[in-house]
Amino acid sequence: MRPSIGKRMQIIILPEIFGRTSFITALETQFLDREFAVQTLDPLGGKQPVFDNEQHAYDHFMNGCGYDGYLDLLLRTVKETEGPMFLIGFSVGASTAWRILENVAYASRIKRFVGFYPGQIRHYLSVYPACPATLVFPKTETHFSVQDVMKPVAGKDSVTCYQSDAGHGFLNPSSVNFVPELSTKFLAAFKDSNPEHIGDGLDYYLSTSFQETVCR
């Protein structure tokens, strides 16, 4: 982790239940190689256990950190981080970030939030982000209707929603739904970016890889 310097854009990565996967490390490295200020919030505390399956990973996450523990980690990090922030979250990491976006004290410092397959936000549909938020949903989810979640969320003025043809976890090499092409293109989206315009390449990736959902 590079230290925060002045008012530089601070990039905060929020992994899913698998913690620091090879994908998360590659994403962080993309930013570090360009001398961006970046930190990864690891819900597994730096440990990298080998999971038999996603249920095993979920049980380990819940027993060690859990949803509220992850939220506390993010809140503490935001309070301690100086400068504007750009949040990138995946699955439970994305849902955790979503939970703080309605609080103006935090959201006023968040330049943008981008979250992939944030299934748990179905429990927080009343949240109205006070900063720009972009969400990318999978084609389907096992426990709920993606359409029923996207419709109210995409109707919020501050939110842009996309939907993928792939399943939950398509960027994660540890997931059964991993799509290498989407993951590789995502990492490449930051290749020529700079801290103040980090979203430019990302927006191109989103618009050319997924279908935007408009419910306004």
Image (spheres, helix red, strand yellow):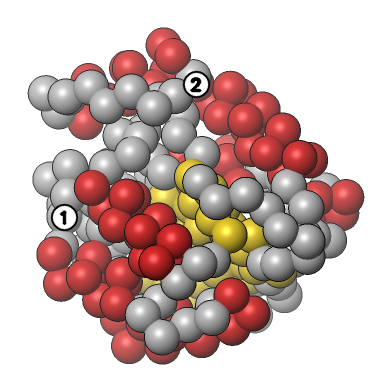
Residue at the outermost top position: 63
Question: Where does the image place residue 68, in percent across and percent down from the top left?
Answer: 61, 24
Q: Residues within 10 Å of mark 1 (few under 14, many from 20)?
A: some
Asked if the residue at tag 2 contacts the one at tag 1, i.e. Cβ–Cβ closer than 8 Å, the answer is: no
Residue occupying the point 57% across, 41% down? 96
Q: Which quadrant holds residue 202?
A: bottom left
Residue occupying the point 49% across, 19% down? 65
- Judging depth in this view, the residue of 28 and 107 nearest the camera is 28
Image-based side of 131 in relation to 17, left or right: right
The vertical placement of 31 against 96, above or below, is below
Q: Is residue 118 visible?
A: no
Tell me the SS state at disc 2.
helix
Image-based side of 142 in relation to 163, left or right: left
Question: Where does the image place residue 11, in percent across and percent down from the top left?
Answer: 57, 59
Residue occupying the point 50% across, 21% down? 66
Q: Is residue 209 visible?
A: yes
Quadrant of the drawing holding the C terminus: bottom right
Residue bearing the label numbered 2? 66
Q: What type is the residue that disc 1 sits on?
A: Phe
Q: Which quadrant holds residue 158?
A: bottom right
The numbered disc on residue 178 is 1
- Judging depth in this view, the residue of 38 and 144 nearest the camera is 38
Q: What type is the residue that disc 2 sits on?
A: Gly
Q: Which quadrant holds residue 64?
A: top left
Question: Where does the image place residue 147, in percent across and percent down from the top left?
Answer: 43, 61
Q: Residues within 10 Å of mark 2 (few under 14, many from 20)?
A: some
Residue at the outermost right position: 105
Residue occupying the point 78% across, 53% down? 82
Of pointers 1 and 2, the one earlier in the residue sequence: 2
Question: Where does the image place residue 83, in percent across and percent down from the top left?
Answer: 77, 60
